[in-house]
Image (cartoon, grey):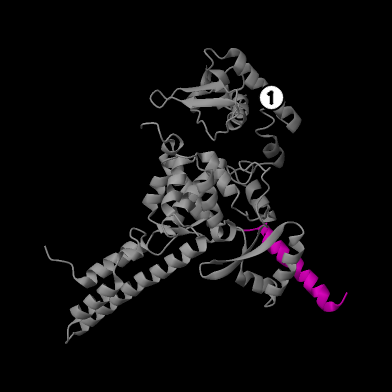
Amino acid sequence: MSEDKAKLEEKVKRASQLLFLRRHRNPGVGEWELKRVIGSDYRAVLKALDERLDSLGLTVREVEHEGKPRFLITIKGRPPLELEPGLGWMRIDSLAGLAMALAFLTAHGGRAPPAEVESFLESKFPKRRARSLLTGFLEEGYLELGKGGAYEIGWRTKAEVDLAELARRIISSAPRSASSENPSQTP
Amino acid sequence: MPTATIRERVMDAFRKVEAGEASPFSWDVKTSAQALRAELGPTPDDEDLIDDARAVDALSGIVGAQGREVEFLASSSVLNPFMLEKSVDRSDVEVLARALWQSISPSVDILQVTVEALVASSSWSPGRKKITWSKRSSTPLSKAEVKKADEFSPKIDAIVDELRATAEDGEADYVSFIKRGDPVERAYLLSFAITDGRVLLNVDPISGKITIKPSERRTKTNASVVIALEELPIERRQGKA
């Protein structure tokens, strides 16, 4: 093995350790940390790591966080349907709450006042639960607070969620309203 | 009451747009620009120029927000926002969860415990006394006499069966039920049965009475129960279980 290849191998290992091991509240690593540990050629190293991860069904994603690039490893494609969403990663009501918040923001051009989002979630969750869900989504980076105090789509949502697919799934899986099911029936 | 100037109205509109309270497209930018120019007048003083610059800055902020919204809507490909919102209204929690589950590529990472975290946690306790590893590992599972995974499921099955056999009118008082044995162990086991949907939990909002009943159909819930200290037997409160 040539010296360059050995060096790249070593850097790929270091990059995978940085990206896999979570040391902060949120997953991923900032550009500055990769530059410091890997060096200025970190993008070539990430590309090599991405090629290795491909066979495992994983991929390296880049997303903008606070105006700077951030890198994290995500599942490539969708998680297997056989996996129960409530086990381990997120509870069912957290997933539903996030789906609601993201759908509401999507329907309002990407931003909305916190009170309106909270009130929307309260249609399906108790007030305290709605508030705690939104606080959690903010802390996890799924939502962000804009300059004017509005809720906006967060950096982690941009990295993990396909919003167009989410909107399509919600519209297609929603039960039809009673009036459309029974047009002849009087309300 | 003095009428707001066009400058004030533009700045107020920008604040509302930034706070998400108004759509950036609800404001007529072209007409506002013309009105601002007219308001400036032919011989503006320094104060006028500063106020005008602030208003123009706010107006450009509205134009920027319009650009961002167009970009967002184009990238999210949502053709009918109204229908999306209505569909969320009509869907139940499970359908929404599944929709997100089918649209997400979750990030993957490995949670780890650092040596520093181990040292810090071993030297911490509510009484600031050092906890020995043997004590940490034996509590609370050894008190609950649950040591292995294969012993755990039968214990949950047993407590659900007991509830089925003893529930009067199909339900039982939660506190009396857990007090029939070691309350902590029984509450611990019941919490899994409740989470798993095998036992349904109901809290009367007026009396605060908690009742449980066995469920034929597994419906997962995330209910949690707070047990007041006074409701536990004295020996348990004193740690003599």
Name the outermost residue toward the front.
A184
In the rendered image, residue B51, in percent from the top left (x then y), is placed at 24, 77
Q: Is A158 on the left-hand or right-hand side of B150?
A: left
Mark 1 neighbour density, 10 Å: few (under 14) some (14–19) many (20 or more): some
Position above or below: A35 against A82: below
| Residue B184 lies within the magenta run | no
Q: Amino acid at mark 1?
A: Lys
Position above or below: B137 against B2: above
Q: Which residue occupies 44% across, 68% down?
A: B68
What kind of element bears circle 1? helix
> Residue B163: in sight, yes or no?
yes
Q: Is A156 on the left-hand or right-hand side of A52?
A: left
In the rendered image, residue B150, in percent from the top left (x then y), is placed at 75, 30
Q: Is B53 on the left-hand or right-hand side of B197?
A: left
Q: Which residue occupies 61% across, 22% down?
A: B182
Chain of the residue on which disc 1 is drawn: B
Quadrant hosting residue B59: bottom left
Q: Which residue occupies 46% across, 62% down?
A: B73
Q: Which residues are magenta?
A: A1-23
Q: Nearer the viewer, residue B19 or B89?
A: B89
Name the outermost residue toward the right.
A1
Position above or below: A182 against B98: above
Q: Which residue is mark 1?
A: B155
In the rendered image, residue A4, in percent from the top left (x then y), is placed at 81, 78
| Residue A13 lies within the magenta run | yes
Q: Which residue occupies 51% across, 67% down?
A: A66
Q: Main secondary structure of the magenta part?
A: helix
